Image (cartoon, rainbow, N blue to C red):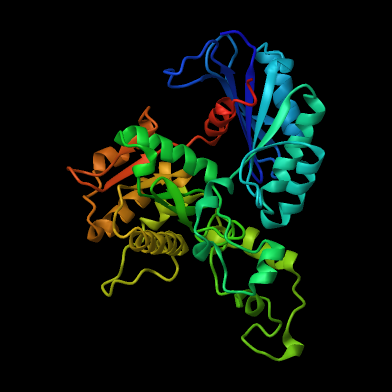
Amino acid sequence: MSHKNLILSLNAGSSSLKISLYALREGKAESDEEPVQLLLTSSVSGISAPPAKFSFKPSSGNAQSVKDENIESIHDHASAFAHFLERLEKDASIDRNAIQYICHRVVHGGDYVEPVEITNESYHHIEKLSDLAPLHNGSALSVIKSCIEALPKSKSIAYFDTTFHTSIPVHISSYAIDPEIAKKRGLKKYGFHGLSYAFILGAVSKFLNKPTESLNLIILHLGSGASACAIRAGKSFDTSMGLTPLHGLPGATRSGTIDPSLIFHYTNKAGRITHDPGMASDIHVTQAEDILNRKAGWKALCGTTDFGIISDKAELDKDDQNGHISKTNLNRLAFDLFVDRILGYVGSYHLKLGGEVDALVFSGGIGERSVALRDRIGEKIRCLGYQDVDRDRNGKVAASDGAVSEISTGVSRRKILVVKTDEQLEMTRECVSDKKLWA
């Protein structure tokens, strides 16, 4: 494999950077299932909590793999990307100038309905949308700026999570507010995790041997940021996140959906519900967003963002004789609360899809790793016509090499699947399929 026609795929999180480098297969044929070959993966975690940890894994060759190496010089996303480029040339002997296209995952694309090449105009438009995705868009822009400076010969292209959800009907995407103000300010449901949902839809289509346009799915992308999506006839029909990623399911530090007035009572000077103007705090939008985006979720409930720890400790607490959980086991509270909110969307989406559902799909870091969560939800959805979760299959998902694993038992029209999602690969596939780029 020659190191030319390279495509770099970047996924910037609030405190992380995931990187995949692909090479376009030379002379790729129409029948070629995968038009690119993965050369290496890399990641940087803990950017906002130094020392950052750097990992580097070539797919083949003589380069050495590195895992969770502490790098003191990384203090933001720009320095994280600079460190990767240095190691790319030093450890993998790959010339950065061979990178032809750079794919950037951008969470909020506003009204963009397709990927866009980064120009001065598109950069500033994405910048204006940062307020709607405060944990992500800023990180992506930082990396985009670094790419423009470090790789001036490469073309940077933004791929938006919101694009996948442009098919949501207007009566679902609209809010019950003044429509003129809503239109002027772009106040509507956008939806997120779209690149992940696009990858999952394709993977399930291949696994079930059914065309995407025939599929009705309920997909759960469960991670530190979590969402659910109803797919009808291969298109997004509804999703749990809304104007911003804050709406819907709770996450590691996000509250998820709450009563809109809760924030005012939460910050009230009196420490109790009151409408005395003298007791009201002057809460700005940015402060309220900070509380609900960074100081809520299961970290606020039980002090950790690691759902694996929550799940393990939750199992230690058994119900008492009246069926109540211990008031002191906040890990069990966080676990059960998450399950409850997930079930709410699963049930709702079954109704919206008229009961015609081909599969319930788990994905994302928690969806792919949490055996206990999948088992609990599987138990609760039997009333909807699903077969039991196979304990053996469920426990071996992490060790599976395939992208899709079935964990439901028996023969059923409705399957329970786990998909190992890959947003970087999805962006790269879209890049390769864009004939304008490769004319």
| Residue 224 in view | no
> x, y percentage for residue 146?
78, 32
Q: Quadrant of residue 105?
A: top right
> x, y percentage for residue 136?
66, 48
> x, y percentage for residue 98?
70, 15
Q: Residue shown at 38%/48% (left/top)? A: 233
Judge left or right: residue 159 versus residue 202: right
**Nearest the camera: 266 or 256?**
256
Q: Quadrant of the N terminus?
A: top right
> x, y percentage for residue 420?
43, 36
| Residue 315 in view | yes
**Nearest the camera: 280 or 299?**
280
**Nearest the camera: 185 or 363?**
185
Q: Residue shown at 64%/20% (left/top)? A: 439
Q: Residue shown at 27%/38% (left/top)? A: 393
**Vertical relation: 373 (above or below) 392:** below
Q: Residue shown at 46%/21% (left/top)? A: 34
**Vertical relation: 185 (above or below) 361:** below
Q: Quadrant of residue 79?
A: top right
Q: Residue furthest left?
A: 410
**Vertical relation: 275 (above or below) 5:** below
